[in-house]
Amino acid sequence: MFRILTHNQISVKGLNRFSREKYEVASSLGEPDAIMLRSHVLCASDVGPSVKAIGRAGAGVNNIPVDICAEKGIPVFNAPGANSNAVKELVLAGMLLSSRGILKGIDFVAGLDQIKDADEMHRLLEKEKKIFAGNELAGKTLGVVGLGAIGAQVAQAGAMMGMKVLGYDPALSVDAAWRLSSDIERMENLQSLLSKSDYISLHLPVLDVTRHMINDNSLRALKPGARLLNFARDAIVDTEALIRALDSGKMDRYVTDFPEPLLIGREDVILMPHIGASTGEAEENCAIMVADQLTDFLENGNIRNSVNFPQLFLERSEGSRIAIANRNVPKILGGILSVLADRNINVIDMLNKSRGDQAYNLIDVETQPDAELKAALEALEGVVNVRIL
C-alpha cells in the first residue's frame, strides 16, 4: 500500500482519486511514499528516504527544495494549466478595473449613506458620474508576454472581446503554439510588444532570464499611457523602475496580484491579495491533476508535468517494470543493460530521457526482478535510485 502525506487543505475531489485499496492518505503519517501539498513550505529535512515523489497542487514550486529533490531522484510534480481559467478571469477583471472608474465609483456610492431621499441621490449620481468615465477594451491592443496555458487563454479572451492581440514568448512550445488563434500576432521581441500595446499582461515563470524583465530599459519602449498587469510573479517586475514609469506618466496604471509596501496607497496601482487561483474550481482541478500524476508515477513510473525530471510515458507491457533515476552522464544506460544481459533478462520495451543533470529510464522485462538484481543496478556508479513496479 502506498502512503500519501498531505499538507494544507487539499480538495476532497483530488484525494478521492487515490484508491482506498492501494493508498493510505493522511495529514500525519510516517514514511510516506509521496507528499502532496499546496503552499506549505517544505524543508529538505522533511524529505525523508521513503519519499519517492512530491506533488504541488498548483503551479509554483518555490516552497519545495526542487534541486535537492532532483539530487535524490525525486520528481516534483505541479499542475500547470489547472488554474488557468481562474487566473484568466481575474486578469480580465483587472483590465476592466484599470479602464473605468469602477472602484472609485463604488467608494463614492458607499459614501452617500447620509442621503435618505432617493431622488436627491439620483440627481447627485447623474451630476457626478462623469468623474468615473473610462474607456472600453474593444479596439485596444493587448500584449501578452508568455503564451503558456494561462497566457494563451488571456490572449484568446482578449481577441473575443474585440481587442487586437499581440503575443511574445521567447520559448514558445509546440503545444502552446497549437493553442493560439491565428488572430494573435506574434512579436519577435519584448520591446516591440511594449511599444504597440495599450495593455500588457505578464504570464512568465521566474527564471534568471525573466527576473526583473520589466525594468528601466524595457519600460523605455512602453507605449505612453499603457497599463501593465502582473498576475504571474512579483520578481518579474523591478518595482522601483515601475514606480519611476508611473511617476513620469509613461505608464497609466499597474494592476497586480502581488502587493508590495512601496505600492500601497498609490491611486495609479490596483493591488489584489494573491487570489489568482483562489477559486473552488481551480483548487479542485489542481488537486485532481496532481493526484493522477502521483498515482501514475507510483504505480507505473510515468512522469508528467515534473519541474525537475524529464517527461516520460511508457504504456505498460506484460512482465515487470524497472524505473531507474540516474545522473545524466555517459555509459550508465550501457551499464544497466549489461546488468540485465548478464542475468539473461530479456527487455520487452524501454524508454530513456534526460533533463539537465537528471536522466530517467523505464524498462519492461519478461521476468520478475529480484532483490539481487535491484542491488546490482543500485550499485552502478551514477544510479540514484531503482524501483521495481
Image (cartoon, grey):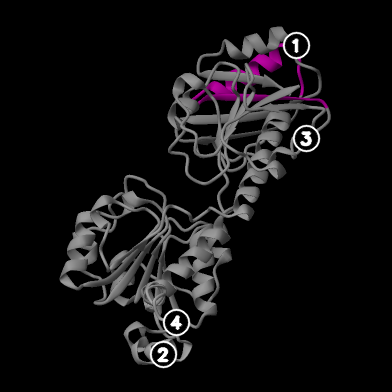
Q: Quarter of the image containing the N terminus?
A: top right
> What's the mark number on residue 316?
3
Is label 4 in contact with label 1 (beta carbons under 8 Å)?
no
Residue 362, picture quadrant = top right
Where's residue 60, x and y in %?
47, 44
| Residue at the spot 51% in from the left edge and 56% down from the top edge | 173
Where's residue 325, x and y in %?
57, 25
Callout 2, which amino acid?
Glu
Instruction: Report the span colored magenta.
Output: 319-346
Is label 3 in contact with label 4 (beta carbons under 8 Å)?
no
Is label 2 in contact with label 4 (beta carbons under 8 Å)?
no
Mark 2 crowdedness (10 Å alpha carbons): few <14, some 14-19, many ≥20: few
Cα separation between marks 2 and 1: 87 Å
> What's the mark number on residue 370?
1
Dot in front, 3 or 2: 2
Is label 3 in contact with label 2 (beta carbons under 8 Å)?
no
| Residue at the spot 46% in from the left edge and 65% down from the top edge | 91
Q: Is residue 192 left or right of residue 174?
A: left
Callout 1, which amino acid?
Asp
- What residue does disc 2 label? 120
Kind of element beneath mark 4: loop
Determine whether 92 is above or below 84 in the image.
below
Q: Earlier in the sequence, mark 2 or mark 1?
A: 2
- What residue does disc 4 label? 116
Q: Is residue 354 left or right of residue 363?
A: left
Callout 3, which amino acid?
Arg
Kind of element beneath mark 1: loop
Where's residue 297, x and y in %?
67, 33
